Amino acid sequence: MGISKKSSKSSTSGHKRTATDSRRVASGRRDKLGSVQLSKIQCKDHFALVEPQINAEGIHTWNFDESCPVDVQFMTEDGRHNVRMNRHGYFEVLYLCSGSALCRIQDRVLPFNEGDLAVIGSTLYHRIECRSSTPVTIAALFFEPDLIRCDGGIDSSEYLMPFLRHDSDFPHIVPSDTGVPRQVLDMMLRIRSELPASSTRARLALRTYLKMLLMLLVNQYAPYAGKVEVFQRQQRALDRLRPLFRHLGEHSGSPTKVKEAARICGMSESHFMSFFKKVTGLSFMNYLNNFRVERAQALLTTTDESLARISQEVGFCDQSYFGTVFRKVVGMTPTNYRNRMASNRALEVPAPIPAKLLHMKQFAPVIPAGRVRRFHE
């Protein structure tokens, strides 16, 4: 994926729990209301958690623990501002705990309903868009594929098949009525109960739970098993655009027109425009405007610079046009956005995990007898 990877031992999983909390989750201990005690787990704002870590190439990076690069997060998305289309070097599994959303993958728009699962590899630009009147809640599993590839097993890469076989017809959404999403969520909660994986036992348990989760997906996607030629073709397409992404990152304050972008990629303008949209899911100008607006959002949130100054810094020659584009992308004016973010920082309280998730039977049997099979069988 050409990922610019970051690691931090001090932020191993983005959340710390006491030993008591972990034992409560792992054992399924229940209070007098009959709910699994996950009350200390808080949802984080999806936009605030993801958007700041997306670079000019649209690559999102995550601060994994180097010794065990896997994480589970709970996030909320209210639809006020969408995360940019992005991709990442890690693999991702999303469970929609509550609400209704759209899963936008390249130029496809897939319904993503409560109880569904989304499976996303490393070469596809994507984002989740809230479409319900109330915020959606998402349980997200992120993991580096090398965690599975490098464990020494001769068939380890077979666990990753669902993330590599992504052609234009691949069913990224696993419906809730298959029963698989709920089983996968069970495994995600088990993985989370072992984080941070500070002991050899915890790392062994974590890898075991991850492989059990992946086996569920391998079984689900058995009809789509095959060679990884599609994945490799997508990687080559991204490589052709990499000089342009590098240029945008290094010259973010300068206007970049389609003609110049096509020249950087060594293509004609017409071929470049169709190629870029096929690879990223957005037209070049939409991608560029989203990138500029994201940089403007960061400056509006972290500096006191004037709107005129910010519009120039992110590559808009005209402040009025900057305001028009910003409002179209974000849904509000730059001034309203700055004021709202300042208010949110002063008042923000993490959202709790939805009650219906707290009442789930966390550790029901995961893989029925006789159901485990190799994907090539």
Image (cartoon, rainbow, N blue to C red):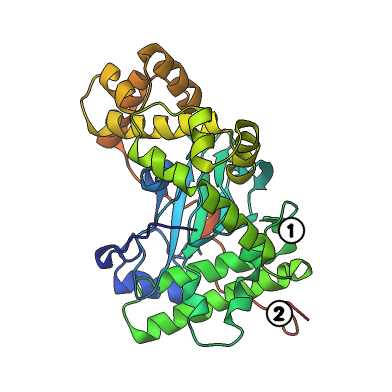
* Residue 160 place in picture, x, y as percent: 60, 71
Say if 349 sits above or below 303 in the image.
Answer: below
The residue at the point 60 percent across, 46 percent down is 279
Q: Amino acid at mark 1?
A: Asp
Query: What is the spatial separation of the Cα atoms under label 2 and label 1, in whole angstroms?
Result: 16 Å
Among the 4 quarters of the image, the one containing residue 266: top right
Query: Are the two marked residues, 2 and 1, in contact with CB atoms closer than 8 angstroms?
Result: no
Residue at (44% x, 75% y) in the render: 26
Circle 2 sits on which residue?
368
- Residue bearing the label numbered 1: 177
Q: Amino acid at mark 2?
A: Pro
Q: Residue 151 in the image: x percent, y percent?
A: 48, 84
Q: Is residue 339 above or below residue 19?
A: above
What residue do we see at 65% from left, 37% from top?
271
Instruction: Measuring from the top left, give residue 84's x and y in whole percent.
Output: 48, 39
Which of the 4 image quarters holds residue 316?
top left
Foreground: 101 or 232? Answer: 232
